[in-house]
Amino acid sequence: MKKIILTLIFIFTLSSCGKDESQIKNEDFSNTLRDVEKITQKHIKVDQNAKANMVSIMNDKNNYQAKIRTTDENELKSYINKNIHKNKKLEWALKNFDKLNHIEKVLIGNDTDTVNFIYNLNHGKTNFNFFEGQSINLGRKTPYYVQWDDRWAYDKIIESETIGISGCGPTSMSMVLSRLLDDKNINPRIIAQDAKNYITHEGIAWSFFKAESDKYGINVKEIKNDEKEIKNALKKGPLVVSVRHGYFTNSGHIMVIDSYEDGKLLINDPNSIKNTKIKWPYEDIKDQIANVWAFSK
């Protein structure tokens, strides 16, 4: 009898994925890692410690093609509509598109993986349990953190700016430090505290990377945007790059290059899991790179 009751409870729990907006508001997303595992088990090993709100953050197809990011509202809405079947909250986003601010529209309209983060911001759901560990374990040399991971996404950096919106700099730096110092306790929440004095509404000051490296006792130097130099520098440690408009951002963005494999770059993009899955030919992104920092012990 107990087994039957437990089975019925389990079936009822699974049926909750079809709820309407009023029901979504009260859902507890702290145990939704199983949704990620269902999608990614054939492609990427998921870190068991990353028990945060990461629902449907992976594309379930292998043929995702990178696209130049846009601010055109018609294109943004079209992309949301195209993917609306993947997440119930995308229906909410499309229905309330005109009520979203510009940044929220651009985030969801370029990468629907961010919809949970934006939905939570708009519904005051910002208090999540904290767990140590990567957002997703990609099996790379450099740990991978997503800036809109619920564990720290809603932490304020300056005024109304959060890590989820403006924290690509400290999130990238936390990946670098965690790798070089072999310290799993270093995460975006910790490094964002140091970044507060370097962040404005325009982005993060590049001097932050030198200051933070000095604090933690690692080496950093700027190198040329050159494939050979990048390849050689990656033999000693990860790189941080600042990029301009293109595949990764509409204006400016910071991300990590983990390694060089089979003639392509493996990038840890703190703002896009889809872009992180791609192996990038240098020629495809060289014109989008504004600056490169090489880190080592």
Image (cartoon, grey):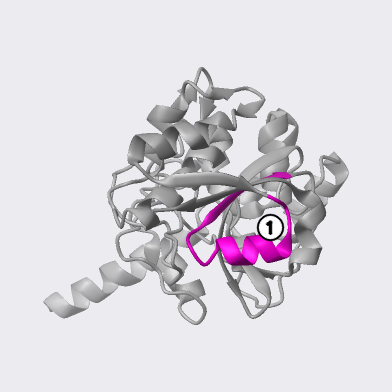
Of 51 and 165, nearer the camera is 165
Of 265 and 87, nearer the camera is 265
Residue 227 in the magenta stretch? The answer is: yes
Q: Position of residue 18 (x, y in %)?
A: 51, 60
For the point 52% across and 78% down, the residue is: 43
Q: Position of residue 285 (x, y in %)?
A: 77, 58
Q: From the image, which quarter does the N terminus lie in? A: bottom left
Q: Secondary structure at mark 1?
A: helix
For the point 48% across and 74% down, the residue is: 44
Residue lying furthest top in this view?
A: 159
Relative to 66, is 150 on the left or the right?
left
Relative to 161, is 132 on the left or the right?
left
Callout 1 environment at 10 Å: few (<14), some (14 to 19), or many (20+)?
some
Question: Which residues are the magenta region?
Answer: 224-243
Look at mark 1 in the image and give the residue it sits on: 84
Of 228 and 124, nearer the camera is 228
**Can you see residue 155?**
no
Question: Which amino acid does the dot numbered 1 rest on?
Answer: Ile
Of 239 and 78, nearer the camera is 239
Quadrant hosting residue 194: top left
